Image (spheres, rainbow, N blue to C red):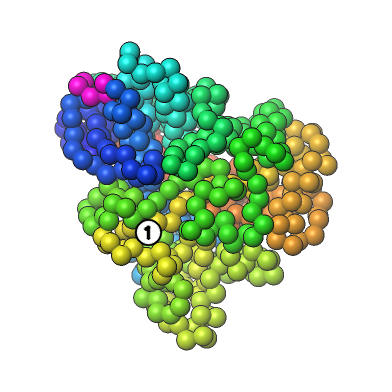
């Protein structure tokens, strides 16, 4: 889907010195099927073509196999204390095992895929923004919305880049080939400033709600939630009051975005209940492409992460067979064993075996598995290669998450302690748990229980200063393990303009 001038650019910063994706629109705005290519200068001449370019930016959010299998949600669960890496053995996915044990180096770890994915998204956003800006044929309303979407998406990709890598190049325009080799890194503060700028500019241009035919496109509520989350994650207490204020607009009863907690916790993760009232930012997946190409899984629309986390060679009711990655740690099991959310979060494999099911115990097996995004027989694709085409969405931000983030921001800014308690209590009351004091430690503990295996835990541990205590026994080292190593090729191709992160060879 990208055309490169020479092989050295293939994994360099933008990946797409010359790039165009020609896609077709279908019911879901993130369901993309490549139809061919066109010369960039002759394309993007009307609203239909510009929309195809915007969809090409959205498309990257679905990717999970760039530079290896690097699906963000299960990979981050493996890096945390929620799950192990798993697989058939330690050599199955060594990059996952390296992240699980924090023994990454410049050539071992998931960094290539995560770097390439996110900079491809940044580049595509920059490209379509440049075309939108130059266009004289777009209606004002259309131009406002697609500009806002592209800026939101650029901020989305940079938020992942700054959290995974720290110092990264800040690119806000289309680069010439020569500029690719002259990139240097910006500080996290500079990256966060650009993320904030993009999200602040994007919000007013996005619709308050998204009609069913457009599900998958971002709303104003998603932009506000993402901005408040970005403010919180910077760990600067001077930003907490603003974060709490923005979260309040999203979280308040009667908010204009239609968000509300679902009465039944398990319904959040039902694949038949996509884009429900609790979902704020959701990455959709489908089997519409009926994909069969193992050489380029990103070309399809399915969630291969679902295949990874399923029980290997499973034979029994409810679930389909998977590959045995991300077995749940006994630490998480013990924390959650008396929690009402356990049954919706964790599959008890031993109980399934006692009922007559079978599966293969793989590397780091605990007999406990991720349930929230597990492969279900009822949703196994009947077209294409089923393993590539799971129609299981990824919910990146949901309302209970923003409730807990607002409660944290209120306490850290000296805001309303009573409102913080209301928010914490609402999350707990939904699953029948009693009120507890609104302290930071209680909020952090609730985040682990409420959001287990959803990909938040690792970054929560890092930003709250708890990573060494919790992950130190697994190999985590302060001053190093917060970030992944920079891909070696990026250092080589920029002739030292990009420096390796501390602690890596």
State left or right for residue 71 relative to residue 292: right
- Asked where in the image residue 345 lies, by quadrant, the reply is bottom right
Image quadrant occupied by the C terminus: top left
Magenta-colored span: 41-45
Query: From the viewer's perspective, is residue 283 above or below residue 85?
Result: above
Camera-side residue of 231 and 101? 231
Q: Is residue 481 magenta?
A: no
Residue 84 shows up from this direction: no
State left or right for residue 147 relative to residue 35: right
- Asked where in the image residue 432 lies, by quadrant, the reply is bottom right
Residue carrying label 1: 390
- Asked where in the image residue 226 lies, by quadrant, the reply is top right
Camera-side residue of 439 and 211? 211
Camera-side residue of 89 and 222? 222
Image quadrant occupied by the N terminus: top left
Question: Residue 295 location, x and y as percent?
Answer: 22, 53
Q: Identify which residue is drawn at 33% across, 55% down.
A: 287
Circle 1 SS class:
loop
Question: Residue 325 location, x and y as percent?
Answer: 42, 65
Q: Identify which residue is drawn at 27% across, 47% down.
A: 299
Q: Identify which residue is drawn at 35% across, 60% down.
A: 93
Camera-side residue of 385 and 325? 385
State left or right for residue 90 relative to residue 197: left
Q: Identify which residue is drawn at 63% across, 59% down.
A: 265
Question: Residue 151 location, x and y as percent?
Answer: 45, 27
Query: From the viewer's perspective, is residue 428 above or below residue 227?
Result: below
- Name the chief secondary structure element in magenta: loop
Within 10 Å of disc 1 (Cα), the crowding (few <14, some 14-19, many 20+) is many
Question: Residue 363 location, x and y as percent?
Answer: 41, 71
């Amino acid at each position: 889907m990208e055309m490169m001038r020479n092989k050295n650019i293939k994994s360099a910063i933008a990946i797409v010195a010359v790039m165009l994706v020609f896609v077709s629109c279908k019911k879901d705005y993130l369901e993309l099927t490549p139809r061919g290519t066109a010369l960039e200068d002759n394309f993007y001449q009307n609203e239909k073509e510009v929309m195809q370019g915007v969809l090409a930016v959205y498309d990257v959010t679905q990717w999970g196999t760039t530079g290896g299998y690097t699906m963000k949600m299960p990979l981050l669960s493996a890096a945390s204390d929620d799950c192990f890496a798993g697989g058939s053995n330690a050599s199955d996915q060594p990059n996952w095992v390296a992240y699980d044990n924090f023994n990454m180096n410049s050539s071992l770890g998931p960094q290539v895929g995560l770097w390439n994915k996110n900079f491809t998204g940044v580049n595509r956003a920059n490209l379509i923004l440049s075309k939108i800006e130059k266009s004289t044929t777009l209606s004002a309303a259309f131009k406002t919305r697609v500009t806002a979407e592209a800026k939101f998406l650029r901020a989305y990709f940079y938020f992942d880049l700054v959290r995974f890598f720290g110092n990264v190049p800040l690119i806000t325009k289309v680069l010439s080939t020569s500029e690719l080799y002259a990139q240097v890194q910006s500080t996290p503060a500079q990256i966060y400033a650009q993320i904030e700028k993009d999200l602040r500019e994007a919000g007013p241009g996005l619709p308050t709600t998204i009609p069913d035919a457009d599900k998958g496109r971002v709303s104003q509520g998603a932009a506000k939630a993402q901005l408040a989350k970005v403010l919180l994650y910077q760990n600067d207490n001077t930003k907490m009051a603003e974060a709490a204020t923005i979260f309040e607009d999203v979280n308040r009863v009667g908010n204009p975005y239609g968000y509300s907690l679902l009465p039944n916790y398990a319904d959040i993760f039902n694949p038949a209940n996509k884009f429900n009232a609790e979902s704020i930012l959701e990455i959709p997946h489908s089997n519409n492409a009926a994909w069969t190409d193992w050489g380029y899984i990103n070309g399809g629309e399915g969630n291969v992460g679902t295949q990874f986390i399923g029980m290997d060679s499973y034979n029994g009711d409810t679930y389909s067979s998977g590959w045995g990655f991300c077995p749940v740690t006994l630490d998480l099991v013990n924390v959650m064993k008396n929690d009402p959310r356990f049954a919706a979060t964790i599959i008890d494999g031993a109980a399934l075996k006692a009922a007559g099911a079978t599966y293969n115990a793989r590397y780091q097996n605990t007999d406990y598995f991720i349930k929230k995004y597990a492969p279900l027989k009822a949703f196994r694709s009947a077209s294409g290669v089923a393993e590539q085409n799971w129609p299981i969405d990824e919910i990146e931000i949901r309302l209970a998450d923003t409730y807990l983030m607002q409660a944290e921001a209120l306490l850290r800014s000296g805001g309303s302690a009573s409102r913080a308690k209301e928010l914490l209590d609402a999350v707990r009351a939904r699953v029948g748990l009693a009120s507890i004091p609104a302290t930071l430690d209680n909020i952090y503990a609730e985040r682990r229980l409420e959001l287990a295996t959803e990909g938040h835990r690792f970054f929560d541990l890092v930003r709250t200063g708890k990573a060494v205590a919790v992950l130190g026994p697994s190999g985590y080292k302060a001053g190093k393990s917060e970030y992944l190593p920079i891909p070696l090729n990026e250092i080589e191709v920029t002739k030292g303009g990009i420096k390796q992160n501390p602690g890596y060879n």
